[in-house]
Amino acid sequence: MKPGEKVYERTMWAFTNSLNDTYEFIFGYFDHVTGKSLEVKFGPGSEHLLEEHSLSIKSEVKGCNVPKSIFGDLSAKNFESTDMYSSELMDLVEWIGLISLADDDDEPDSSDAGLSDGYLRLEGNVDVAIDSLVSDIDPFISLYSIPEPNDIMKVSVTSVGGLVNPKIINDLANAIQSKVDHFVLVVSGFTDTPISWYNKPHGFLTSGENLYVQVRNSRLNTCLTARYCGAYDSFS
C-alpha cells in the first residue's frame, strides 16, 4: 500500500475512526538481494513505541523412535507421481509433526542469531529414546502413534523464532543441503502472514495459511513439499 491509494486511505481511516484499542504490529525491512535486516524508520515521537525483536535459536539432539519406512517410498522415481494423500507421505508428515509438537515445550534460546523456523536431520543410533515424546502430547491435539518397525535414533532439531524472511530460509536450506543427505524443513507462522502460492490472491481466509514441510534429499537432488490447505485456499 502507498499513500494516496484507496486501500491505504481506507486503512488509515479505519485506524483513526474505528480501531480504538491498542494493537501490536511486527515490521520487517530487509534488503531484497542479501536478505539483511535494515533499519525501519518512523515519524518523530514514535521512538517510545518501538521495540526491537531479534531472531531466537535453539538446537538440540534428542533420541526418538524413527520408523524404518520414514523415507523409504519417497525416492526420486516416485516424486512426480506421488499421491499427496498416500499413506507413506502422511506418515512422514505426521511423524514430523510429532517431533515439532514435542519441541514446542521449551522456550527458544535467544543467545545466538537465528536462521529459520526449523529443520530436522537424522544423525545415527543411540541407546535411549525419549519415552514421553508421544505420551506428553494432549490426545485432543493428536492420537498419532509411531509406526512399527522403528529404530531409536538421534534427531537433530533446530528451531528459530522471529520474523524470518524467505531469503534466510533459502540460505539455511542450501547450507544444510551441503552437509547432510536427508533433512526436513518446517516453516510455520501466523494465519494471515503475507505469503502467496503461484501468485494467487492472499487474505486471512483465502490462501492465508503459512505452514509447509519440505523433505529434501541432497544426494538425489529432490524436494517434496507438503503444505497446509484451508477451506478457502485458492491454490488447493
Image: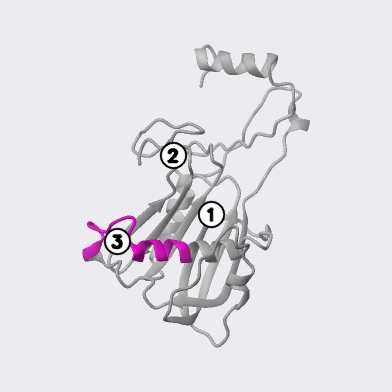
Mark 2 crowdedness (10 Å alpha carbons): few <14, some 14-19, many ≥20: few
Start-end of magenta stretch: 77-95
Per the image, the residue denoted by label 3 is 222
Inter-mark Cα distance, 3 to 1: 21 Å
Inter-mark Cα distance, 2 to 3: 29 Å
Check residue 74 in the rendering and tell me which mark sits there, or answer none: none
Residue at disc 3, secondary structure = strand
| Residue at (67, 61) in percent of width and height | 109
| Residue at (42, 45) in percent of width and height | 229
Q: Nearer the viewer, mark 2 or mark 1?
A: 2
Quadrant in which the C terminus is drawn = top left
- Across and down, in percent, residue 49 comes to 75, 31
| Residue at (49, 80) in percent of width and height | 153
Per the image, the residue denoted by label 2 is 231
Residue 128 visible within the image:
yes
Q: Earlier in the sequence, mark 3 or mark 1?
A: 1
Q: Name the side, left or right, on which 223 lies relative to 116.
A: left
- Across and down, in percent, residue 155 comes to 51, 73
Q: Amino acid at mark 1?
A: Asp
Most foreground residue, 58 or 32: 58
Q: How many marks?
A: 3
Residue 198 part of the magenta segment = no
Most foreground residue, 95 or 6: 95
Q: Amino acid at mark 3?
A: Thr
Q: Name the side, left or right, on which 3 lies relative to 184.
A: right
Per the image, the residue denoted by label 1 is 117
